[in-house]
Image: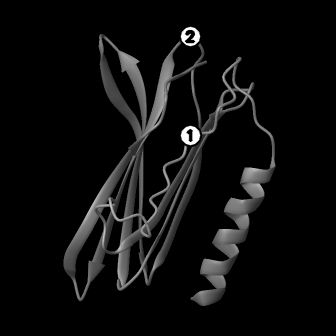
């Protein structure tokens, strides 16, 4: 199981090294939580890292990873959303639950041109099947 986790982390790092482009917005969105900062509200979540990009060919790339401490199970749920009729609509949902203190979710989906898209990702951490904490990330909007 450790080998699978290490391979997933290497895959995510490799995906981050490959340049991808979507119109003129090339900003990578991420949320990092610094647990050494006394104003941080989390006890168990260390870092929640998220990347959302759309390539020039319309491939949406979504990556969420979380590291925690004092946990034995982590769940990530990620939504690809489209803006339709003045509201955000889920067009695709992925989730993964992994044991331990590291969880990674990397997915891709082709989107239709002429729309606005965003990624919304939730992370939940558990110990002995007891919910401990959660966090959420919402990317900036990307027009494709």
Please provide percent x and percent y for residue 9.
65, 70
Foreground: 29 or 82?
A: 29
Q: Residue furthest right?
A: 18
Asked if 2 appears above or below 31 in the picture, the reply is below
Tell which of 102 and 4 is nearer to you. Answer: 102
What residue lies at 23% left-to-right and 74% top-to-bottom? 132
Q: Are marks 2 and 1 in contact (CB under 8 Å)?
A: no
Q: Which mark is residue 114?
A: 2
Could you say which quadrant of the image residue 57 lies in? top right
**Disc 2: CA contacts within 10 A as few (<14), some (14-19) or many (>=20):** few
**Secondary structure under the numbered disc 2 in the rendered image:** loop
Residue on which the image places disc 1 = 29
- Residue at 77% across / 59% down in the picture? 14
- Vertical order, 20 against 72 (above or below): above
Q: Quadrant of the C terminus?
A: top right
Specify which label sits upstream in the sequence, 2 or 1: 1
Q: Quadrant of residue 114?
A: top right
Q: Against 74, is 94 above or below?
A: above
In this rendering, the count of numbered labels is 2
User: What percent of the width, then of the height, locates residue 69?
Assistant: 41, 81
Horizontal arrangement in the rendering, residue 46 relative to residue 42 (left or right):
right
Q: CA distance from mark 2 to mark 1?
A: 21 Å
Which of the 4 quarters of the picture holds residue 13?
bottom right
């Amino acid at each position: 199981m450790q080998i699978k986790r290490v391979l997933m982390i290497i895959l995510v790092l490799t995906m981050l090294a490959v340049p991808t482009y979507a119109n003129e917005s090339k900003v990578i969105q991420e949320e990092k939580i610094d647990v050494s900062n006394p104003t941080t509200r989390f006890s168990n979540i260390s870092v929640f890292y998220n990347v959302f990009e759309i390539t020039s060919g319309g491939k949406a790339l979504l990556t969420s990873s979380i590291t925690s401490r004092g946990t034995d199970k982590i769940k990530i749920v990620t939504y690809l959303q489209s803006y339709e009729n003045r509201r955000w609509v889920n067009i695709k949902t992925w989730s993964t639950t992994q044991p331990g203190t590291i969880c990674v979710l990397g997915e891709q989906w082709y989107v239709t041109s002429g729309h606005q898209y965003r990624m919304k990702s939730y992370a939940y951490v558990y110990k002995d099947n007891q919910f401990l904490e959660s966090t959420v990330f919402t990317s900036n909007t990307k027009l494709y």
